[in-house]
Image: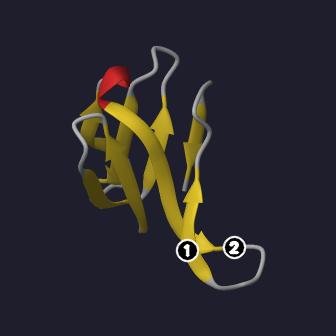
Amino acid sequence: MAVFMLQLAEGVDDVVEAQAAGRTRTGEIVLEAADERGNPVRIRTYRPEAVTAVFRRGPGDSGSYGWIPQPVSGTWWCY
């Protein structure tokens, strides 16, 4: 599991634990977990205009943990 922080356009942050986050071809931000058989299940979906930034909690270049920004455009997945 990973921890993701989404900065929302309404001015609040949403912190979510999920196995993966991604930006789809249509710009939606999706968060997924796996069911008991290992199949991906979307646990949350955000409209493109609702999210201003996505971060994953993890080790930075210095080795200390922090919020690592994810790409602001294009299709991507982060685990």
In the image, 56: left or right of 33? right
Which of 63/34 is in front? 63
The residue most toward the right is: 61
- Residue 57 numbered tag: none
Location of residue 8 in the rendering, given as x and y in whole percent from the top left corner:
30, 40
Q: Which residue is drawn at 77% across and 74% down?
A: 61
Location of residue 4 in the rendering, given as x and y in whole percent from the top left corner:
41, 58
Against 62, is 48 above or below? above
Give the quadrant of the N terminus: bottom left
Location of residue 27 in the rendering, given as x and y in whole percent from the top left corner:
46, 20
Q: Residue at x 69, y 73 (%)?
A: 60
The residue most toward the front is: 11
Say what secondary structure mark 2 lies in.
loop
- Residue 60 numbered tag: 2
Q: Is residue 40 something one can see in this rendering?
A: no
Q: Which of marks 2 and 1 is nearer the N terminus?
A: 2
Q: In which quarter of the image is residue 51?
A: top left
Badge 2 crowding class, 10 Å Cα cut-off, few under 14, some 14 to 19, many 20 or more, is few
Q: Is residue 59 something one can see in this rendering?
A: yes
The residue most toward the bottom is: 64
Tag 1: amino acid: Gly
Against 77, is 4 above or below? below
Give the quadrant of the C terminus: bottom right
Tag 2: amino acid: Gly
Please give the residue where the numbered disc 1 appears in the rendered image.
66
Q: Residue at x 64, y 85 (%)?
A: 64
Q: In which quarter of the image is residue 40?
A: top left
Say what secondary structure mark 1 lies in.
strand
Against 22, is 66 above or below? below
In the image, 74: left or right of 8? right
Q: Residue at x 33, y 55 (%)?
A: 37
Residues under numbered marks 2 and 1 in contact, where contact means CB atoms less than 8 Å apart: yes
